């Protein structure tokens, strides 16, 4: 088990983590730190708890936006797949119509 210390909103937090995860935790802490600084800049005098609360809310808002965007993209991909399936069906029908037309033309006007 590895140990690391994260600095967020001017305070140090010692943590234990799995070996090799220190850099990842440091990266996550830097994301929280940026949001905490943003909260402190926009609302001076926040307590530590409120600073972390606002940082968490900022991050949750970003996550929510990304989830909505991902859902929108999935829906668009589903529509694209439906459009592709419909295009294949139309092409198959067109090929059948051409075959029928060729047969009728080969039979001549007397048939």
Image (spheres, helix red, strand yellow):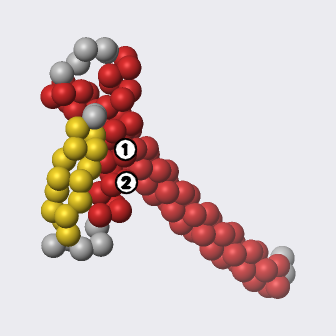
Callout 2 environment at 10 Å: few (<14), some (14 to 19), or many (20+)? few
Quadrant of res 102 = bottom right
- Where does residue 16 sit, x and y in percent of width and height? 15, 62
Which element carries disc 2, helix, strand or loop? helix
Which element carries disc 1, helix, strand or loop? helix
Residue nearest the viewer, comparing 15 with 71: 15
Describe residue 92's horizontal placement relative to residue 108 as left or right: left
- Where does residue 59 sit, x and y in percent of width and height? 32, 38
Q: Residue at x 74, y 74 (%)?
A: 98
Residue nearest the viewer, comparing 77 with 54: 54
- Relative to 65, does residue 102 appear above or below in the rendering? below
Q: Which residue does the numbered mark 1 point to in the structure image?
A: 31
Tell me, yes or no, whether the two marked residues, 1 and 2, touch with CB atoms within 8 Å. yes
- Where does residue 20 sit, x and y in percent of width and height? 30, 72
Residue nearest the viewer, comparing 80 with 10: 10
Numbered circle sitting on residue 27: 2
């Amino acid at each position: 088990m590895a140990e690391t210390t994260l600095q967020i909103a001017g305070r140090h937090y010692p943590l234990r983590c799995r070996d090799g995860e220190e850099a990842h935790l440091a990266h996550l802490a830097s994301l929280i730190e940026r949001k905490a600084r943003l909260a402190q800049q926009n609302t001076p005098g926040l307590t530590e708890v409120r600073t972390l609360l606002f940082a968490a809310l900022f991050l949750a808002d970003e996550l929510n936006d990304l989830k909505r965007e991902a859902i929108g993209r999935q829906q668009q991909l589903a529509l694209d797949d439906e459009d592709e399936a419909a295009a294949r069906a139309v092409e198959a029908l067109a090929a059948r119509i051409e075959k029928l037309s060729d047969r009728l033309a080969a039979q001549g006007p007397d048939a």
